[in-house]
Amino acid sequence: MQAWEGSSESAEATRRIGEALGRLARGGDVVALSGPLGAGKTTLVQGVARGLGLGAAAVVSPTFLYVREVKGGRLALYHVDAYRLVGRAGPGEAAGFLEELGLSHYLRSGGLTVIEWPEPILDALPADHLRISLDWVEDDPSGERRQVRVEAWGERHEALAARLAAELGWRPARAGAGGGQAGGRGDQAGERDGL
């Protein structure tokens, strides 16, 4: 696993990160987005849609649908939200439930699959995937700044992450930093508009 770190200063900057990812992604890529409520996961996916030529307005939180398919761009975007499974089912149960909904179909479809709240289904993901975590920067008085960490699992996604980091000017993560999921303020700011 290789990792890079960067930051976002605003919702639009978060969309630009996603847009770069959308431009660089290839069919079959899988991205898992972690972070507390309101940290900017859906905002980042709006940028991904823009980078795929779909337009940011095509993306809304799929919380009540589990999966939203957005087609018409360079690649289809499969936007998965496993939030309702967090804390409600063990990893095997959650993965089984999403399998019933056709997760493996989306993963094999040749589109880009982006999964918010992936923790309950990490075991169901391909070994080769990208993980992105977003969290607030604790000492930012504006509350707008986010820390972003990208972890690449497997060669295919290491290449994607390296291209993304180069485009964004990000640095490799410090050894021992992070660990795959954002920490920080947790759900305390769930009522806030996400970045």
Image (cartoon, rainbow, N blue to C red):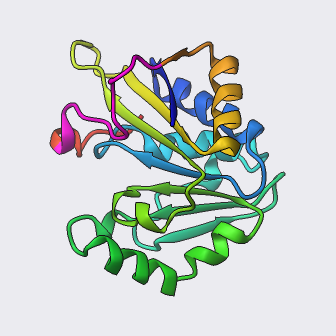
Looking at the image, which is closer to me, 67 or 192? 67
Looking at the image, which is closer to me, 177 or 59? 177
- In the rendered image, the residue lying farthest to the left is 188
- In the rendered image, the residue lying farthest to the bottom is 100
Report the label total: 0
Where 97 sits versus 116, above or below?
below
- Quadrant of residue 181 within the rendered picture: top left
Q: Is residue 177 magenta?
A: yes
Residue 89, horizontal then vertical, whole percent: 25, 75
Q: Is residue 132 left or right of residue 38?
A: right
- At horizontal 42% and vertical 82% (from top left) the residue drawn is 96
Where does the magenta region start and end?
173-187
Q: Is residue 176 magenta?
A: yes
Looking at the image, which is closer to me, 149 or 44? 149
Q: Is residue 2 left or right of residue 174?
A: right
Residue 52, horizontal then vertical, whole percent: 76, 46
Looking at the image, which is closer to me, 151 or 167? 151
Image quarter of the C terminus: top left
- Quadrant of residue 119 within the rendered picture: bottom left
- At horizontal 46% and vertical 58% (from top left) the residue drawn is 61
- At horizontal 76% and vertical 37% (from top left) the residue drawn is 23
Where 186 sits versus 89, above or below?
above
Examine the residues drawn in magenta and state their main secondary structure.
loop
Residue 46, horizontal then vertical, whole percent: 59, 44
Where 118 sits versus 132, above or below?
below
- At horizontal 63% and vertical 32% (from top left) the residue drawn is 161
